[in-house]
Image: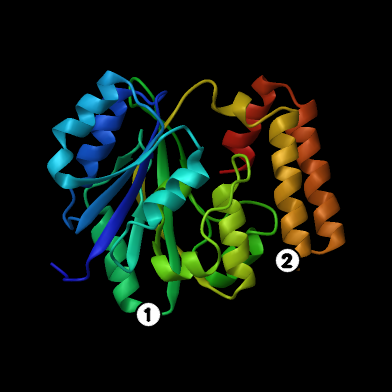
Amino acid sequence: MNELKFSVLMSVYCKDNPAWFREAVQSVFSQSCIPAETVLTADGPLTEELEAVIDEFKDKLKIVRLEKNMGLGAALNAGLKECSYPLVARMDSDDISLPDRFEKQIKAFETDKDLSVLGGAIREIDSESKEEVSFRRLPQSDTELKNFLKTRCPFNHMSVMFRREAVLECGGYIPLHLMEDYYLWARMAAKGCRFANLADILVNARTDKNLYSRRGGWKYFKSNKAIADKMLSLGLISLPVYLFNLAVRFCVQVIMPNSVRSIFYKKALR
């Protein structure tokens, strides 16, 4: 197996499901290519059940504790500062990485020395039954992804591996409600960082009936407007594209009922 060392970056908070969290952590240590370290940020006080999972894996985890819940962006930044290795793989607290995920990503970074961020496809599964719900595959080449970024997020965040220094040089994760990762990719694109996605499915991502309701409403629309504002100011999109993005998002996220929105996401955005 290759010798390139890397860190895994995770965050957990009090509302996470302990059983799913345990499964997520276990999938990190069941890889064909084991990380040199796994950094876990405890984002505020946790439940006894979550602490029990941490205790089970305490010899394999580097724990960073925040006194109060600060949100995903702040939690990831705190953990990122403690990552010791040049490559960092993101891992969510309720998803399951496939056994060869890290091996495939490390090989890609060894092949392309200029690569800054590498993601992959995900399989969305039902939270409880684990039955397949859908797939989410994204463009693969740097050129395609930079163009895709103008209208939609170019990575499945839970699948990415990135160069630590490239992320830090672009300011790391900056709080922006539900858009911390998208905003990071936008700033990295503006800096000329190189992107890629693997066609392979890397992660089984849990989803539930509330997923599409969370992708609607005024608050979510305001977050999408905020990221559009940022991309316009960075020169990544033109004014016509900016206005088009807002019009589409207003229709989908504010006007469209949740039952229709779920169909739209599953059919039109896959």
The image position of residue 156, as x and y in percent, is 48, 49
Residue labelled with disc 2? 234
Rendered image quadrant of residue 23? top left
Q: Quadrant of the C terminus?
A: top right
Compared to residue 118, the image places residue 8 above or below, namely above
SS category of the residue bearing label 1: loop
Q: Which quadrant of the figure has residue 199?
A: bottom left
CA–CA distance between discs 1 and 2? 26 Å
In the image, taking residue 248 as reference, residue 94 lies left or right, namely left
Work out whether mark 1 precedes mark 2 in sequence or the reverse, and give the earlier one.
1
- In this picture, residue 196 sits left or right of residue 244: left
User: Which quadrant of the rendered structure holds the N terminus?
Assistant: bottom left
What numbered label is drawn on residue 113?
1
Q: How is the image coloured?
A: rainbow
Q: Nearer the viewer, mark 1 or mark 2?
A: 2
Question: What's under tag 1, amino acid-wise?
Answer: Lys
Task: Tell me where residue 60 appears, x and y as whole percent.
Answer: 16, 46
x and y, in percent, of residue 162 in the image: 41, 63
Can residue 195 be seen from the camera position used here?
Answer: no
Q: Nearer the viewer, residue 55 or 218?
A: 55
Count residues near mark 2 (Cα–Cα under 10 Å), then give few for <14, some for 14-19, many for 20+.
some
Determine the residue positioned at 33% across, 65% down: 87
Counting from the top left corner in percent of width and height, residue 19 is at: 27, 24
Amino acid marked by disc 2: Leu
Disc 2 is placed on an element classified as loop
Can residue 156 be seen?
Answer: yes
Residue at position x 13%, y 43% in the image: 59
Q: Please say if 20 is above or below 242.
A: above
Callout 1 touching callout 2 (CB < 8 Å): no
Q: Nearer the viewer, residue 222 or 165?
A: 165
Label 1 CA crowd tier, 10 Å (few <14, some 14–19, many 20+): few
